[in-house]
Image (cartoon, rainbow, N blue to C red):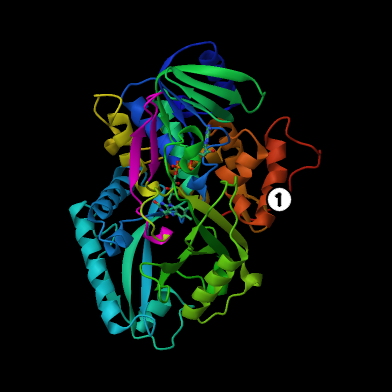
Amino acid sequence: MSGASLNAARRAAELDALASGEPVDLVVVGGGITGAGVALDAASRGLSVALLERRDLAHGTSRWSSKLVHGGLRYLEHREWGLAWESARERALLMGTIAPHLVRPLPFVTPLNSGMPAAKGTKTHIGLRIGDGLRIGARTSRRVLPPARRISALEARRLAPALSETGLRGALLSWDGQLEDDARLVVAVARTAAAHGAQILTYAGVSGVRDDGVDALDGLTGAAFSVRARRVILATGVWAGELSPAVALRPSRGSHLLIPAGRLGDPRAAVNVPVPGERGRWVFALPRADGLVAIGLTDVAAEGPVPDEPQPSADEEAQLLAHASAALEVSLGPEDVAGRYAGLRPLLAGSDTETADLSRRHAVSEDPETHALTVVGGKLTTYRAMAQDAVDRITDRPCRTHRLPLVGAPATGLASTATGEAPPRLARRFGAEAAAVAELGSTEALASGVPVCEAELRWAVAHELALTPEDLADRRTRAGLVPEWREAVLAAARETIPGSSSDSSPPPTSTTSIS
Ligand SMILES: Cc1cc2nc3c(=O)[nH]c(=O)nc-3n(C[C@H](O)[C@H](O)[C@H](O)COP(=O)(O)OP(=O)(O)OC[C@H]3O[C@@H](n4cnc5c(N)ncnc54)[C@H](O)[C@@H]3O)c2cc1C
């Protein structure tokens, strides 16, 4: 496990070595899912790799997704067959080999009611059947993702009790993959890259790209340094234009609201409804393992400078609440919103279309002067294929990532094999490492209703490169999604990270177990 352990001491030693002129084959810029994926792909092919991220792992778009590993159904609506097939294939790899501990099957209920006239219902059912064809082609077993089928109104309401009964003729039941958490996938990919020798440096912002490496700034000390590298791959998402001005993006904002699941009758399935009058746009309510339901998703062109942390607009919030309430028996208002978040999709600029119609394809392009490659676009689900495309451009060595389990996946050899009982939250988030996490500290909830424990904070500092209290609250545990949870975790995190505590009060205590 030590090879996969990332922490402040390892970062400092690796930064020193790189800054003193030790060359690498590849510098990757950006520590979102794309950069982490590229680092893993290259390191597992035997290249020496350094990844530089200016903030924390998953600080950008990669933590603001809908957390779905999806089989590409929405691309079928846009007749993007290749993209749909790529998604189905990558989903099969993630759920079967790469990260089965982080991706779970999620049932989706699409109600057949006045919003879904018979003809549209039939078309949707045909689309779901084609999706099943892709699933079969990609060899995802029906035990993992059962085939789509029509269900009765009664069954639909059993799965999603808040579904409105008005005009409900039945529903379509389909299945797709849901991530435990997107930031955890990024951390798992980065740690697996580290286990293959990659040097992962956070708080290391790249200020310039040369043909023999990059210039960078240590965000913790303010010191400038350079890294010598044979090749550079930029994976800076919506910030791509800053270091590669030739890359044209049209970012689009997508927002989610988080509602306590109890308010919606503790659904066991997601509800998926079309947005009236808009082709290919759906609003969904996704139940999460932390007792929240995520309602999304908007798609709004985001002009102007790229913010560090995008926020949902009041308009988007009102739209989401209205669309969800129309499909449910419950009328949701702002008082029901426990948390909210927004992210910017790094969409490739195309013709003058709505952002909802812009392709989710990815691209790899080369800067004619520095020969740096930029890899951008795509989505979480297809990060591995994006990384393979990029790294294929710099080496002939064969890609190995399609059969490489991430840390925490069952039987990886990289993960701890310690056995023992771990609380369900730790098992869901750490897979085969959960028992080792539980050994590091208390597994009781930090405070009543806050689904985070001391053990995972300690683990994140020792093995997951959490350097600040915010890294712990906002990226490793995701308590930051709910303001009250965030406060409790920040208080405990200041005690866990030496030197970050500004007050000496002890962290909140509690006797509630986490689930
Ligand atoms: C609302 C929303 C919902 C989505 N839902 C899904 C979904 O359910 N399933 C799915 O498959 N996909 C989904 N996506 C798409 C997916 O989230 C993105 O395609 C993906 O996260 C992009 O990852 P990235 O690594 O390219 O970019 P990012 O995650 O933004 O990473 C780029 C990183 O580069 C760093 N960086 C920038 N400049 C520099 C610099 N100069 N030096 C060093 N570092 C730098 C940034 O700090 C950042 O961490 C969704 C996207 C959005 C916006």
Residue, far right: 504
**Residue 411 visible within the image:** no
**Few, some or many residues within 10 Å of mark 1 (<14, 14–19, 20+):** some
Point out residue 458 in the picture as x, y percentages from the top left corner: 61, 36
Q: Residue at x 71, y 38 (%)?
A: 494
Horizontal side of residue 57 vs 270, given as left or right:
right
Q: Is residue 194 magenta?
A: no
| Circle 1 residue | 487
Magenta highlight range: 355-377
Front-most of residues 28 and 17: 28
Point out residue 491 in the picture as x, y percentages from the top left corner: 72, 45
Q: Residue at x 41, y 32 (%)?
A: 192
Question: If the image is split into quadrants, where does the N terminus sit?
Answer: top left
Q: Is residue 485 above or below residue 170?
A: above
Q: Is residue 3 above or below residue 427?
A: above
The residue under label 1 is which amino acid type?
Answer: Glu
Residue, far bottom: 167
